[in-house]
Amino acid sequence: MAKKRRKPTHAQVVAVAASLPVGVLLVAGHSLPLAVNVALVHTALSGAVVALCSMKSLCKRTTSLFGKNAKGVLGLPNQLAFLPFQCAIRAKLLYRRRFGEEPLWDHVKDGFYIGGWPNEQQSLPTPDAAVVDCTCELPRRHRNPYLLCATWDTQSPTVEAYERGVAFAAEQRREGERPLLVHCAHGHGRSAAMLCAILIAQGKAATVDEAERLIKSSRPRVNLNKNQREGLEQWFAQKYKSL
């Protein structure tokens, strides 16, 4: 059987992207206008910082890099400092939504939804849906009940974040069975890990594998990577295996 190919991490992808303007500077920087050189240096430096902060060894302590607060608002100075990254991630999301075939969100079971970043109020699956946001890089664009569990792309929420997500989901479900959307940038990794924990806590699945299969049956591109599975299983072990 062929060995499953491991996808690059967010830090690796951003690091490669940040090296491109460095290459341009080395090859042609002397012949470019000063403004272009400044923009290339800004892009390279900000990308290098994002790549460093999103590494597994640092990711738990650096989710505030973009200044995102509990209301989902990004800090303006932070957005300006990392403007190249912000422009790149939003352009990527816009392109995928315009030309990709995957829906923004999918219904998994009994009012639980998973999806990508809802960039406007109308992007929510239902007008009254509560939202668990697993991104640290994208702003909130809606007025609905909201919980931020800031996590870097390709990384896992912390055990504490899983607990907050589970508690928030339980509270929203008690309030008239309110629908719940769990999202990250694309709705494949961070959000899937969080929704696995919520489904297990809600009694919709008994194990991590069962929860992942349930989500994948509705959103086939969902895939927990090694980091996300390890973080989720750590939460599961602390919460259930000691009972």
Image: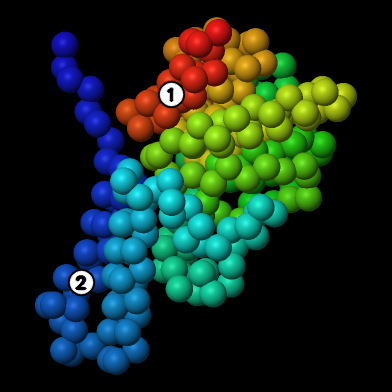
Q: Residue at x 77, y 28 (%)?
A: 171
Relative height, residue 23 to residue 199 (above, below): below
Left or right of residue 88: residue 47:
left
Relative height, residue 131 to residue 22 (above, below): above
Determine the CA span between mark 2 and mark 1: 39 Å
Can see residue 99?
no
Relative height, residue 25 to residue 14 (above, below): below
SS of the residue under disc 2: helix
Residue 130 is tagged as none
In the picture, residue 170 is in which quadrant? top right
In the picture, residue 42 is in which quadrant? bottom left
Q: Position of residue 100 (x, y in %)?
A: 48, 40
Marked residue nearer the N-terminal end (2 or 1)? 2
Q: Quadrant of the C terminus?
A: top right
Which mark is nearer the camera, 2 or 1?
1
SS of the residue under disc 1: helix
> As shown in the figure, which amino acid type bears the numbered disc 2?
Val
Q: Position of residue 79 (x, y in %)?
A: 52, 69
Q: Nearer the viewer, residue 68 or 42?
A: 68
Identify residue for label 2. 22
Left or right of residue 221: residue 131:
right
Can see residue 18?
yes
Q: Residue at x 43, y 51 (%)?
A: 61
Residue 234 is tagged as 1
Q: Residue at x 34, y 89 (%)?
A: 35
> As shown in the figure, which amino acid type bears the numbered disc 1?
Gln
Q: Quadrant of the N terminus?
A: top left
Q: Position of residue 86 (x, y in %)?
A: 47, 63
